[in-house]
Image: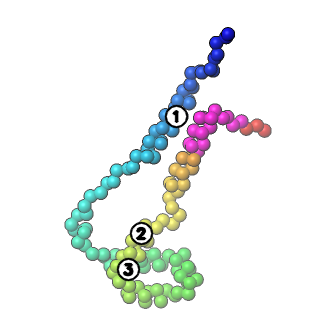
């Protein structure tokens, strides 16, 4: 009787690299990132909201053409808005100003670029693991 060959061959270096990357990324996904925190300095913890600075931030935001147009669409005039600003409490003004400072007009696109890169890498890894080749012909 002839010996049975199982067809075991030496794995390609690409396959080994792909598996190494899969295991590495899986390990990174499981391990939580360490928290980095420190107590706030006493001069920051004791300082209250700066109403003047926050009001200037709020006024600068309200002077933008897009914001004025949107508020006009909602039925608010510039005079009504300016009349309502002094009636806001310090906490309200600070909350709105801090949210304005966190806004970005269109985002920076970094998250989108990273997302697309991750998706492309996952597709490449899957294709390498399954030994699938994509052939484009005209």
Q: Quadrant of residue 129?
A: top right
Which of the two discs, 1 and 3, labels the residue nearer the N terminus? 1
Whether residues under marks 2 and 3 lie with C-beta atoms below 8 angstroms apart, the answer is no
- Reply yes or no: does residue 131 show up in magenta: yes
| Residue identifier under label 2 | 101
Q: CA distance from mark 2 to mark 1?
A: 44 Å
Q: Position of residue 95 (x, y in %)?
A: 38, 75
Q: CA distance from mark 1 to mark 3?
A: 53 Å
Q: Position of residue 101 (x, y in %)?
A: 41, 69
| Residue identifier under label 3 | 92
| Residue identifier under label 1 | 19
Say which of 17 and 117 sits in front: 17
Label 3 SS: helix
Residue 62 seen in render: yes
The magenta span reads 120-135
Which of label 2 and label 3 is nearer to you? 3
Pick the quarter of the image with the C terminus: top right
Which of the two discs, 2 and 1, labels the residue nearer the N terminus? 1
Say which of 1 and 88 sits in front: 1
Residue located 51% across and 55% down the image? 111
Q: Position of residue 35 (x, y in %)?
A: 33, 54
């Amino acid at each position: 009787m002839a010996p049975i060959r199982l067809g075991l061959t030496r794995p390609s270096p690409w396959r080994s690299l792909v598996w190494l990357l899969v295991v590495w990324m899986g390990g990174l996904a499981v391990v939580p990132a360490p928290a980095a925190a420190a107590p706030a300095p006493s001069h920051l913890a004791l300082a209250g909201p700066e109403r003047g600075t926050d009001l200037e931030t709020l006024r600068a935001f309200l002077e933008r053409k897009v914001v004025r147009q949107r508020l006009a669409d909602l039925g608010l005039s510039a005079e009504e808005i300016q009349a309502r600003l002094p009636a806001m409490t310090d906490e309200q003004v600070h909350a709105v100003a801090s949210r304005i400072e966190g806004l970005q007009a269109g985002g920076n696109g970094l998250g989108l670029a990273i997302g697309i890169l991750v998706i492309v890498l996952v597709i490449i890894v899957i294709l390498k693991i399954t030994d699938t080749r994509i052939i484009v012909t005209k």
